[in-house]
Image: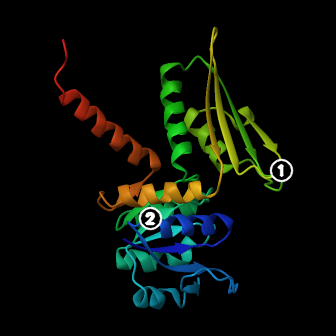
Amino acid sequence: MKVGLIGYGKAGAAVARVIDADERFELRWIARRTTDPTDTGHPVTRLAADSFPAWLDRHPVDAVIDFSDASAVHIYGEAIRRRGITLVSAISAYPKETLAYIRDLGRDIRVMSSPNITLGINFLMFAARMLRRIAPFADVEIVEQHFRDKPEISGTARKIAEKLEVDNERITSLRLGGIVGHHEVIFGFPYQTVRLVHDSIRREAFGTGAAFALHELAKYPPGFYTYDDLLLNLIRQDLAVGSAQPAHA
């Protein structure tokens, strides 16, 4: 699968390393807002509405991974729509109008959007939501820890709170040193406590999650999808296989 990468900050660079090392993919180019001369080992273009369509025609890809910012999709969205290019977006927080636009792209192309694209955190959110349904009476607290200079509450923590239908006041944020990302969901029962924990040890975890999304999304028709959709489909497949196995006496 031929892939283009939009955004080349610390996370984007880590994603590029993972995609490069995965034989299922070929990283064809990197698009950025600036003309930073950093050597990426790949062709680089400046992301601009007037030149990007021609760049895509000269350097065609099957899919694009977006690790830039919330406004970038308005620059490249129509260009990838017209060319049938799959989009995997890892932007942590979209304004409502931009999210509506991304959903609209899903009418014509495959789109998967996740505020945190690591596989582990998405499984944590999936498991937390299941436990919340099983035990809606349990107290819930969310703890997120990130590097010292990250100013705002993480988009992932907000997404967890949204999925569990708890207020953002239940989120505790800590900023320490160089922590890449720590999320913990604590369920308080009358006689027991359940903790679901995910730690991102290196930013390459984003690349592993993006690779998983690219591989799975290729199996789907055009549409707007979330990480939950991809995970739930795999779980359904596993349950179907399990139910087809003969019962042992």
Residue drawn 33% across and 43% down? 233
Query: In terms of image quadrants, where is residue 87?
Result: bottom left
Q: Which residue is mark 1?
A: 177
Image spot of residue 86 (x, y percent): 39, 68
Image height of 126 relative to 216, above or below? above
Give the residue at the far top of this rendering.
191
Query: In terms of image quadrants, where is residue 205?
Result: bottom right
Horizontal relation, residue 125 to residue 69: left or right: left
Q: Which residue is mark 2?
A: 22
Q: Nearer the viewer, mark 1 or mark 2?
A: 2
Tell me which label, 1 or 2, sits earlier in the chain. Answer: 2
Could you say whether the residue bearing mark 1 is in a helix, strand or loop?
Answer: loop
Q: How is the image coloured?
A: rainbow
Residue drawn 60% across and 39% down? 160
Image height of 137 relative to 41, above or below? above
The answer to whether any part of residue 68 appears in the image is no
Query: The N terminus appears in which quarter of the rendering?
Result: bottom left
- Label 2 amino acid? Asp
Could you say whether the residue bearing mark 2 is in a helix, strand or loop?
Answer: loop
Horizontal relation, residue 218 to residue 92: left or right: left
Image spot of residue 137 (x, y percent): 58, 16
Residue drawn 53% across and 53% down? 114
Label 1: few (<14), some (14–19) or many (≥20) C-alpha neighbours in 10 Å = few
Q: Nearer the viewer, residue 167 or 21?
A: 21
